[in-house]
Image (cartoon, rainbow, N blue to C red):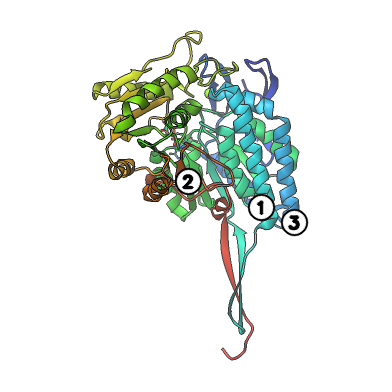
Amino acid sequence: MSGLFVELTAPNGRKYSQPRGLFINNEFVKSKSGETITSINPSDETEITSVYAAGPEDVDIAVTAARKAFKDPSWRDMDTTARGDLMYKFAELIEQHKETLATIETWDNGKPYSVALNEDLAEVTGTIKYYAGYANKIHGQVIDTSPAKLAYTIREPLGVCGQIIPWNYPLAMAAWKLGPALCTGNTIVLKAAEQTPLSILYLATLVKEAGFPPGVINILNGEGRKAGAALASHMDVDKIAFTGSTATGKEIMKMAAVNMKNITLETGGKSPLLVFDDADLDQAVKWSHIGIMYNQGQVCTATSRILVQEGVYDQFVKSFKEYVTQASIVGDPFKDDTFQGPQVTKTQFERVLSFIESAKSEGATLESGGEVYKDVGGKGFFISPTIFTNVKENMKVYREEVFGPFVVITSFKTEEEAVAKANDTTYGLGAAVFTQNITKAHRIARLIEAGMVWINSSNDSDLRIPFGGVKQSGIGRELGEAGLEGYTNKKAVHVNLGTKL
Ligand code: NAI
Ligand code: MG
């Protein structure tokens, strides 16, 4: 296959034209080397299509395009209300094409179609609209010092932003990065994850249709170690924003050091969920399920360690097992009642299975699942929702991010022990606390080392609220007003109004 578009029919019968190129300067082009990556449907392991994959030379061309666009008055000096309007138009086009975008997302990633359409795509349009609203509200300050001096700040865009996104929320993670970068006047080279290269290319067609000047948004597919590394180490890129694993985040930090790039990192987690004796147990069970099993367990904030106080431990484990069995319906992601589709790739599938083996060999107790789920046509990367108890703190499955429908449960005696256990991790992304005692809830919220705390829920995320981690879960924040910080400089201007000094 060598064309730049291919006509496809998705498993749900939807026909559409799939772009296959690299999107640079508002045009689809082939990679210089001709290299491609193949996209696989994780539900049945068939090949969907292949797309062009960027190498260092292509990254360089995209960065040059983004630099030129950054300096072009048509973008740099665009009226900020007009810039917001452009972003609204982009959001409207995404809304009009949401069924196609959600179809591609489900086909390539394996997430349930109802989730892709009603949650992921709503997140995409919501985020672009939210930041569109900020475009004409970005301003500096006048800072009073003395009558002889006038000092003010200007919030400037950083320049060319490299954005590297993961495969668990391909379009939503793109929107989280595009929104704040665009409304502040930056230009972008975004690299999608090689596991899910398709939906972002369809989104690229809407970039052009919305009317963004060429070079403002460039979108590349390509392997992390080639295209991703070329972007992170490029001397003419001013910022790198990354979502993915902690190990890769550390590599990116090192590469970004070559020209001291501004960085934002959203990385891994092993987020605890604490259930106290005085919790509303039905609520705790319901949210514990969502907190770990949603999106096939492929969520950076997944509450993957459940810690339960001794008085309600047995009852919790029993109710949780029953709830998971009834609510985690595994199946074809295009079917309406499916809660859990396949893992995104064979690699991820095998990785989760290896953690299951590790838990067994280290002596944890398998309460349910723990095996390949074969009832969806015998193919695909499906895993039964898996629960382990009798998990010790030194076990690999207690310490490492699994990124699958896999949870470990352990117990604690006192509040102090709960906090100590919750914080006994190199990560610090999210944490959930279940108690009916509001004083205790807020006390613990302050003591937990995490970027986000959920009281009597898990994994709430709202595009108006800052999202990010502490410790090895990341640097900086996305979403909300806080998301703008990662995309602007504050330039200080000093004006001398006096003559004596
Ligand atoms: P990854 O962190 O290696 O990949 C994420 C993105 O980084 C992709 O776009 C990839 O192409 C890029 N990348 C990879 N190596 C790079 C490099 N050397 N330089 C520049 N860019 C690079 O994650 P991967 O391998 O897909 O998944 C492995 C594990 O990472 C998962 O099992 C999960 O635990 C974790 N993960 C966490 C995510 C999160 O949302 N926090 C998302 C994806 C993965
Ligand atoms: Mg795929």
- Does label 1 or label 3 sit earlier along the sequence? 3
Q: Which mark is residue 416?
A: none
Q: Which mark is residue 79?
A: 3
Residue 121 sits in which quadrant? Answer: top right
- Pointers 1 and 2 in contact (C-beta within 8 Å): no
- The image position of residue 165, as x and y in percent, is 52, 38
Q: In this view, does 257 lie to the left or right of 201?
A: left
Q: Residue 134 carries which label?
A: 1
Which label lies toward us, 1 or 3? 1
Q: Are marks 2 and 3 in contact (CB under 8 Å)?
A: no
Query: Does the CB distance between marks 1 and 3 fall below 8 Å?
Result: no
Is residue 455 positioned above or below 263 on the image? above
Residue 263 shows up from this direction: yes
Q: In this view, does 121 lie above or below 449?
A: above
| Residue drawn at point x = 64 percent, y = 17 percent | 10
Q: Is mark 1 on a helix, strand or loop?
A: helix
Say what amino acid the circle numbered 3 marks. Answer: Asp
Give SS at disc 2. loop
- Residue 468: give its label: 2
Query: Quick one: SS at disc 3?
Result: loop
Taking depth in this image into account, of 358 and 386 the one nearest to the observer is: 386
Q: Give the amino acid at mark 2.
A: Gly
Residue 306: where, in percent of width, then height?
36, 32
In depth, the one of 484 and 164 nearer the eye is: 484
